Image (tube, grey):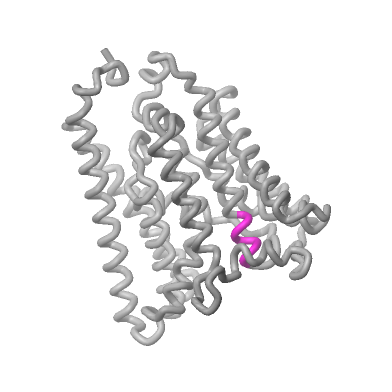
Amino acid sequence: MSLLDAPPAALAPARTLDSWKQRLQQLLAFAGLLVIFLAFSIAAPTTFATYSNVMNILFSAVVIGCLAMGATLVIVSAGIDLSCGTGMALSAVMAATFMVTWGIPVWLGILLTLAFGAFIGFVNGTAVTILGLPPFIATLAMMMICQGLALVVSGVHPIYFDPVAQKSYLWLSTGNLFPGSGFPNAILVLLIAVTVAYLVFNKTLLGRYDVSIGSNMEATALSGINVKKWLIVIYSTAGVFTALGGVMISARLGSAQPATGAGYEMQAIAATVIGGTSLSGGKGSIIGTLIGALIISVINNGLQIIMLPQQWQNVVLGTVIVIVVFIDQLRNKQAKTR
């Protein structure tokens, strides 16, 4: 009898233990966020811990957070998505093409952009399931394809949104639903995205099968679940969050920059793993991922405020990624020896 066939009572102790471990991981990640925030507050007491800078931190966490939501779904299934960064850039270019070049209304342009992101995910999922490519290779190829198409479609030039015709689009990110609060709408969009991701992951069949596939793909298939179909759905859903990141970054900049996106995939993956999602699959947390995105944003913001050169900022972020992945590997080894 496999775990998937075991009666609920037999699985209850294991689920309770996993739940406590997940909460502990989230607590540790949140404690780490507070420690990092405090360290930068001490290093730059007059500039870092101000209300406006906290809003800047949250504002900059929006794009990473959106990408990390999708990355969580994929990594939990024991996959990886290296195309989310350049996929975000291509989605931004497509959003500008829909609304600026083709003159499509903003609301329809956003929907088409999200659908385009789902298509990118669909291609990734198809390459992994139907063609049998390793997720690393499939999404690496898609990363290069998206990078090239973003330059081709845009003509190697930024596409600027009209502040009059696309005013509501720009307002989606930089506007204020609460005037005078200094609270940009982008943060509200991130909260909505996190809520949707949480419900999808914790309250739907997609989330349940996502964990099951990542834990034991063979046992999941033997239980009668169409693993290939659900993997395609998982990658497609992740693509929607990638496209949302493209919408938010282009609305923030007021333009679609075809060269942006490179490096965002590493930050999204790092945020996901910091939040407690295992690179081996089968375990993940949307709330933990949000905390991880905030940690990445705090580090980026703090290093800029203390005026650390850009090249050293990359060194610090790269070191953080190495440490996080190393800790994840140790955690997996300990779990296997028990």
**Main SS, magenta residues:** helix
- Residue beneath the point at 76% across and 62% down: 159
Residue 303 image offset from top left, x and y in percent = 42, 73
The image shows residue 138, relative to residue 20, as above or below, that is above
- Quadrant housing residue 15: top left
* Camera-nearest residue between 119 and 167: 167
Would residue 245 be seen by someone viewing this image from the given angle? yes
* Camera-nearest residue between 21 and 143: 21
Q: Which stretch is magenta?
A: 246-252
- Quadrant housing residue 321: bottom left
Residue 25 image offset from top left, x and y in percent = 26, 49
The image shows residue 99, relative to residue 44, as above or below, that is above
Would residue 97 be seen by someone viewing this image from the given angle? no
- Quadrant housing residue 115: top right
Q: In the orientation shown, which residue stands out farthest toward the bottom?
A: 46
Image quadrant containing the C terminus: top left
- Residue beneath the point at 59% across and 56% down: 261
337 sits left or right of 123 in the view: left
